[in-house]
């Protein structure tokens, strides 16, 4: 039975994601600078976004072709640029910048430019001031991405080179002394798994989830930096819709991993990561777009939500409370550019601010500050959250129960059931805390449900097996 259900989930997920009801995130503010120029390659003015919470103030860190912008978002409806740090290289050469903070310091890198450098910025005096305390290209002149494992003070530099260090597919640095990074090791293969590059990484407690571009994916235990242990690896032929393995993120409980291949028309992959030596593909998810040029970029998992910056499809947010039944619930369009075979639109997302506000960077239009609509927040377990709406049993043998929290049940909602082709097969009003719905007239198949009211919506998969 489990195999049969999983088959339906994976086979139909691409179609199913297209018809899930979604709610727009609430727009709070945006920021851009009309004097900045775009990159020569993709005409993108902006790139990565990061977030900071220091001394009770909140900041967005936004990368551009010019450098690093510190945007004060403490009052999300009245945001402003508080500080700016020019990059070693600026202008049309720059496409990528990347940021991580650790122990009161922000680490900033770029992937282009002969004068680019690793910049370390003291942020402990925010909101009053910032101080660049390290600016050198000797160890890192360029790196495509980096990730800091704050549990061990190790920085992982992906596709990196310095003025005094040769090109490396993956290089680690000790940053336990925050302003004096020290090179540790260089890697081109681990445990027999060779990679052309490591494009991005997620690392916690020395366990790294490595997105290796055209070489696939690997999980590595770096407890012994000189002799790391390969826990698991996937070559491109080992999983469906494989392409350029770009990025991924691990759920807070460590049991679910979501990764994306940065290829037009490909789904994101959801894995059960409970056993680090044997991952299991449990779902494929997407932005629900009908365009063959829909393409994911970066993912972050926070609480029970997956946040994905999805280029032309803006920001997409998925409810992951049930990893076997992930549903798209929220979105926001940051771009007005039509889908095409390029890279434009939403680049990065940051959901970790204490306020619960969401930061999104768009390559052409700049910074967006967003929030969940109504009372829904990823930082709180609120009674009014749609995650408290339960539909069971699933799979169903011909009848389901819909339980809605009492507060939500006070307003009338509409329950709609669709076939995978988008045909409506059931529509019923719900205005009680618990409702039974008969499905005996339906054939055994996978369906998609939508529950909608004036203030909330929830959607997901439903399987009928009779």
Image: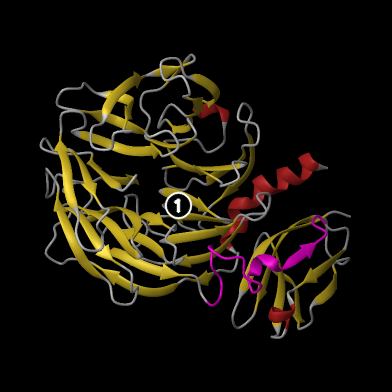
Q: Quadrant of the C terminus?
A: bottom right
Q: Which residue is mark 1?
A: 292
* Residue 262 image offset from top left, x and y in percent: 41, 43
Q: Quadrant of residue 143?
A: top left
Magenta-span inclusion, residue 404: no
Q: Residue at x 59, y 58 (%)?
A: 17
Q: Main secondary structure of the magenta part?
A: loop
* Residue 210 image offset from top left, x and y in percent: 45, 32
Q: Residue at x 57, y 33 (%)?
A: 239
Q: Quadrant of the N terminus?
A: top right
Span colored in magenta: 374-395
Magenta-span inclusion, residue 392: yes
**Left/right of residue 119 with respect to residue 385 in the rendered view:** left
Q: How is the image coloured?
A: secondary structure
* Residue 422 image offset from top left, x and y in percent: 65, 65
**Left/right of residue 97 with respect to residue 155 in the rendered view:** left
Q: Nearer the viewer, residue 212 or 152?
A: 152
């Amino acid at each position: 039975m489990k195999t049969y259900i999983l088959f339906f989930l994976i086979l139909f997920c691409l179609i199913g994601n297209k018809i899930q009801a979604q709610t727009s995130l609430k727009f709070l503010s945006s920021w851009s600078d009309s004097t900045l120029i775009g990159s020569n390659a993709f005409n993108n003015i902006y790139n990565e976004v990061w977030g900071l919470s220091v001394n009770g103030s909140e900041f967005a860190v936004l990368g551009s072709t010019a450098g690093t912008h510190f945007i004060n978002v403490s009052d999300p409806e009245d945001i402003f640029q508080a500080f700016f740090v020019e990059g070693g290289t600026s202008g049309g050469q720059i496409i990528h910048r990347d940021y991580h903070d650790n122990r009161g310091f922000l680490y900033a890198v770029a992937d282009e430019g002969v004068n680019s450098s690793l910049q370390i910025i003291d942020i402990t005096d925010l909101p009053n001031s910032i101080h660049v305390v390290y600016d050198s290209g000797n160890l890192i002149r360029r790196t495509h991405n980096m990730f800091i494992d704050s549990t061990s003070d190790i920085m992982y530099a992906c596709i990196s080179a310095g003025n005094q260090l040769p090109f490396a597919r993956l290089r680690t640095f000790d940053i336990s002394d925050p302003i004096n990074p020290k090179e540790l090791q260089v890697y081109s293969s681990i445990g027999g798994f060779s990679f052309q590059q490591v494009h991005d990484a997620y690392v916690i407690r020395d366990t790294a989830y490595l997105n290796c571009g055209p070489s696939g994916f690997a999980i590595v235990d770096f407890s012994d930096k000189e002799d790391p242990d390969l826990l698991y690896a996937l070559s491109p032929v080992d999983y469906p819709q494989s392409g350029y393995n770009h990025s991924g993120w691990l759920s807070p409980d460590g049991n679910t991993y979501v990764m994306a291949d940065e290829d037009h028309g490909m789904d994101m992959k959801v894995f059960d990561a409970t056993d680090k030596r044997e991952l299991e593909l449990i779902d494929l998810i997407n932005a629900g777009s009908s365009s063959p040029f829909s393409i994911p970029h970066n993912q972050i998992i926070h609480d029970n939500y997956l946040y994905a910056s999805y280029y032309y499809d803006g920001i997409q947010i998925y409810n992951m409370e049930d990893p076997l039944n992930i549903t798209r619930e929220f979105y926001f369009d940051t771009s007005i550019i039509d889908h095409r075979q390029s890279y434009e639109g939403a680049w990065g997302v940051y959901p970790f601010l204490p306020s619960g506000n969401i930061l999104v960077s768009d390559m052409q239009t700049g910074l967006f500050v967003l929030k969940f609509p109504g009372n829904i927040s990823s930082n709180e377990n609120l009674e009014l959250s749609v995650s408290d709406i339960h539909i069971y049993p699933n799979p169903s043998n011909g009848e389901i129960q819909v339980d809605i929290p009492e507060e939500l049940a006070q307003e009338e909602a509409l329950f709609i059931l669709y076939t995978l082709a988008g045909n409506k097969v059931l529509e019923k009003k719900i205005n009680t805390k618990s409702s039974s719905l008969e499905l005996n007239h339906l054939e055994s198949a996978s369906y998609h449900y939508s529950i909608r009211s004036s203030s909330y919506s929830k959607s997901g998969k439903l399987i009928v097996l009779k």
